[in-house]
Image (spheres, helix red, strand yellow):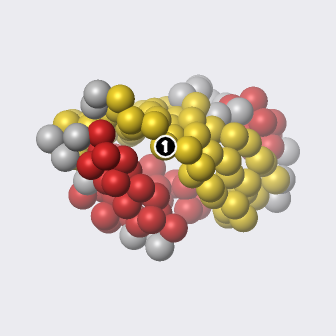
C-alpha cells in the first residue's frame, strides 16, 4: 500500500510539471480538502479548497499568482494512509515581481487510491511579505 501511495503522489508531481492539472483534480475524492496552511488574508493561495473543482480553482490561482523557477519534490516517506514529501521551490510573485524561495512539506492523505486530503506547510511570512511588495 505505501509504495502504491508514493507512486500515486509522484505521478501527481509529474502531472504538475507537465501542466496537467486535470490529472491532479481527477485524483481527488469528491470531499478532498486541499489546504495550504496560513491566513488567506496574507496571501491568496493560503487556505482550503474542497473537491476536484476546488483543486482546479486553486491551481488556476497558482498560475495567476506565481511563476515557478524551481519546484523540486526531494524526499518521499509513506506511513499508513499518508505520504509526506519534503521539497523546495522558488517563484516570482507576478503582482510584485518579488522572488520567494522556501523549503516545504506536503502531506497527502490517501483513501482507496485517491487523495482525500493535502496540506502544505511553507514559509508563509515570506510569501505574505513578497505579496505586499
Residue 80 shown left or right of residue 92 in the figure = left
Residue at x 59% of width, y 26% of height:
39
Q: Where's residue 72, x and y in %?
A: 62, 55
Image location of residue 65, percent across then percent down: 63, 56
* Residue 5 versus residue 11 in the image, above or below: above
> According to the image, label 1 marks what residue?
76
Q: Quadrant of residue 22?
A: bottom left
Quadrant in the rendering for residue 115 = top left
Q: Position of residue 113 (x, y in %)?
A: 19, 46
Residue situated in front as seen by the camera: 40 or 52: 52
Query: Closer to the camera, 113 or 39?
Result: 113
Crowd tier of the residue under label 1, counting other residues whose Cα lies within 10 Å: few below 14, some 14–19, many 20 or above = some
- Above or below, 128 against 94 in this view is above
Image spot of residue 71 (x, y percent): 63, 57
Task: Look at the image and tell me whether residue 118 can be seen.
Answer: no
Side of 91 where 53 appears, left or right = left
Give the camera-side residue of 111 and 68: 111
Residue 105 falls left or right of residue 125: left
Q: The C terminus appears in which quarter of the rendering?
A: top right
At 37% from the left and 60% from the top, the residue drawn is 11
Amino acid at each position: 500500500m505505501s509504495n502504491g501511495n508514493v507512486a500515486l503522489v509522484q505521478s501527481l508531481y509529474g502531472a504538475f510539471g507537465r501542466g496537467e492539472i486535470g490529472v491532479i483534480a481527477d485524483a481527488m475524492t469528491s470531499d478532498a480538502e486541499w489546504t495550504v496552511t496560513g491566513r488567506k488574508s496574507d496571501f491568496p493561495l493560503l487556505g482550503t479548497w474542497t473537491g476536484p473543482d476546488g483543486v482546479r480553482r486553486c491551481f488556476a490561482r497558482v498560475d495567476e499568482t506565481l511563476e515557478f523557477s524551481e519546484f523540486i519534490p526531494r524526499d518521499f516517506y509513506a506511513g499508513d494512509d499518508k505520504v509526506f514529501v519534503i521539497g523546495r521551490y522558488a517563484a516570482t510573485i507576478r503582482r510584485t515581481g518579488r522572488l520567494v524561495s522556501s523549503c516545504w512539506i506536503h502531506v497527502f492523505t490517501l483513501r482507496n487510491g485517491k487523495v482525500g486530503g493535502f496540506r502544505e506547510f511553507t514559509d508563509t511570512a515570506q510569501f505574505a511579505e513578497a505579496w505586499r511588495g
